[in-house]
């Protein structure tokens, strides 16, 4: 059965939804049919305040005119150009703009279509880099417990979320993991960056000693672990990782799929923490979520290592049909312009202070065992219902949706990451909405 004009589809069975409780959803669907600025419109005509920038990606808010217009114009002018052995101007322009706004030392860009593809690209660049340098024994990849690096095989191998890994066999070989840095006993209710746990970075030294540096290609971390529940690194932790990787000739990859494009109140997490990686993985906010696209930035040293041999030979055997797609490039350029027009890459620094204050006012509300924040990201960790983990947070999600707020939950943690255009009044509205939800659920 199908009815292409229906606002609400009449048969939901064909679409196997991603990361969704499909059977439960299809019994009581939640559908968005429109969006503008800070709000979604539901299929039953209600306005929902977007507390999560979609899935952490709509940083400039919804349906921004410059971006919408750029897409329409580009689609009519040059819809597609082959990505391999051909070019089009906007992909080059975009790469230059990205190099301009990213930390010094990241000078070249590879385009992808998602965060997951950006992660795979980064891992492959790291492995191939050592090989072209004559250090082909450096094949190990080091990730971290509780990390999310997308859902492809490389990403789940270096990732540290058990449910995303356990069904899928042996994954990549030669991967090890550092411990995560979350510590409720020591750091609960910290405002901003937590004090305790810097020495956990030294676990990397232990892993290097175990395997020998000569076997390790790269370390990949999210500057702030997002998907797993907003785990903010202890003070000095990322600097320490940088020192250790540099000392041992190991590449440091920052997965900035969430922390990139203004989320922390700085253009990138690297800027916030004053640590420049060798490779930076981005996606999401690059196009404001409107067209799938990712970008991986690499140092000149990495890029230049590949630029050898006969000039007619392909230097790196990797790429996607849609790498640097013209419409995606146009969307990204218009997104970066919108960020610039409205200072959105740094607006979170000031707004984050109001956001933190409002968020931490939830301390003492029912079920709340931790609150944490950085830039325009926040998390409220709830005491799980004994024997039914995730149930309480999911009830909060449903209650929030019913009362007009989109929040995100992972485990028993509520994560917030509103569009960076949010006003002070809307921050207050969102937090008061969550307060009411916490008081209403079991
Ligand atoms: N790396 C990081 C750090 C991410 O957060 C990815 C890679 C993968 O990106 P793609 O575009 O392939 O999904 C992500 C994505 C959530 C949530 O609510 C988080 C993500 C995606 C969907 C939901 O926590 N992160
Ligand atoms: N599978 C097949 C059969 C293909 O021909 C291609 C690309 O040509 C792919 C997968 C990869 O698709 P993409 O380049 O969109 O990642």
Image (cartoon, rainbow, N blue to C red):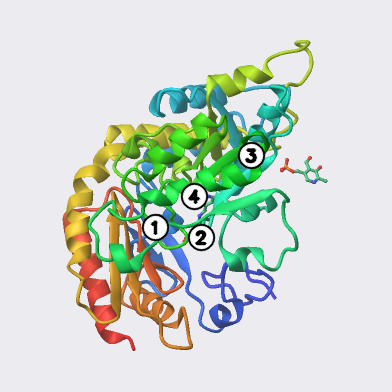
Residue 186 in the image: state x and y as whole percent.
Answer: 30, 64
Closer mark to the observer between disc 1 and disc 4: 4
Closer mark to the observer between disc 3 and disc 1: 3
- How packed mark 4 is, by other alpha carbons closer than 10 Å (few <14, some 14-19, many 20 or more), is some
Which residue is at a point 39% across and 70% down the rendered structure image?
A: 413
Mark earlier in primary sequence (3, 1): 3
Task: Say which quarter of the image contains residue 313.
Answer: top right
Label 1 element class = loop
Label 4 element class = helix
**Please, is residue 28 above or below residue 175 in the view?**
below
Mark earlier in primary sequence (3, 4): 4
Label 3 element class = loop
* Residue located beneath label 4 in the image: 203
Q: CA distance from mark 3 to mark 4?
A: 14 Å
**Please, is residue 239 above or below residue 190 in the view?**
above
- How packed mark 2 is, by other alpha carbons closer than 10 Å (few <14, some 14-19, many 20 or more), is many
Residue 212 has which mark? 3
Check contact, mark 1 vs mark 4: CB within 8 A: no
Closer mark to the observer between disc 4 and disc 2: 4
Quadrant of the image containing the N terminus: bottom right
* Residue located beneath label 2 in the image: 146
Residue 95 in the image: state x and y as whole percent.
Answer: 51, 25
Residue 311 has which mark? none
């Amino acid at each position: 059965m199908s009815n292409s004009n229906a606002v609400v589809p009449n048969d939901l069975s064909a679409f196997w939804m991603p990361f969704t409780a499909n059977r439960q959803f299809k019994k009581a669907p939640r559908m968005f049919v429109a969006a503008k600025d800070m709000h979604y419109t539901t299929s039953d005509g209600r306005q929902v305040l977007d507390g999560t920038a979609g899935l952490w990606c709509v940083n400039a808010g919804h349906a921004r005119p410059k971006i919408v217009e750029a897409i329409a114009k580009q689609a009519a002018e040059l819809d597609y150009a082959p990505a391999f052995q051909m070019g089009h101007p906007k992909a080059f322009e975009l790469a230059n703009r990205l190099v301009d706004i990213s930390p010094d030392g990241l000078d070249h860009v590879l385009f992808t279509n998602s965060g997951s593809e950006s992660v795979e690209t980064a891992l492959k660049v790291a492995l191939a880099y050592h090989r072209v340098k004559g250090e082909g024994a450096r094949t190990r990849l080091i990730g971290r417990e509780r990390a999310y690096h997308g859902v492809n095989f490389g990403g789940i191998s270096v990732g540290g979320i058990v449910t995303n890994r356990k069904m899928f066999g042996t994954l990549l070989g030669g991967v090890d993991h550092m411990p995560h840095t979350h510590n409720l006993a020591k750091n609960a209710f910290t405002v901003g960056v937590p004090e305790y746990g810097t020495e956990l970075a030294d676990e990397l030294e232990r892993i290097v000693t175990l395997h020998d540096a000569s076997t390790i290609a790269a370390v990949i971390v999210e500057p702030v672990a997002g998907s797993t529940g907003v785990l903010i690194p202890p003070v000095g932790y990322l600097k320490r990782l940088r020192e250790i990787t540099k000392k041992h000739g190991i590449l440091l990859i920052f997965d900035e799929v969430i922390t990139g494009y203004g989320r922390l109140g700085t253009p990138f997490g690297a800027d916030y923490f004053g640590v420049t990686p060798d490779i930076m993985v981005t996606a999401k906010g690059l196009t404001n979520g409107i067209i799938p696209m990712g970008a991986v930035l690499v140092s000149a040293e990495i890029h230049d290592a590949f630029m050898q041999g006969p000039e007619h030979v392909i230097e790196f055997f990797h790429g996607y049909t849609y790498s640097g797609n013209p419409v995606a490039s146009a969307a990204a350029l218009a997104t970066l312009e919108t960020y610039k027009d409205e200072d959105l890459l740094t607006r979170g620094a000031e707004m984050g202070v109001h956001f933190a204050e409002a968020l931490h006012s939830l301390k003492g509300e029912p079920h709340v065992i931790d609150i944490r924040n950085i830039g325009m990201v926040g998390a409220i960790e709830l005491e799980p219902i004994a024997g039914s983990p995730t149930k309480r947070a999911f009830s909060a999600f449903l209650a929030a949706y019913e009362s007009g707020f989109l929040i995100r939950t992972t485990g028993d943690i509520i994560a917030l990451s509103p569009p960076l255009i949010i006003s002070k009044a809307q921050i207050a509205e969102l937090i008061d909405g969550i307060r009411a939800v916490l008081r209403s659920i079991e």
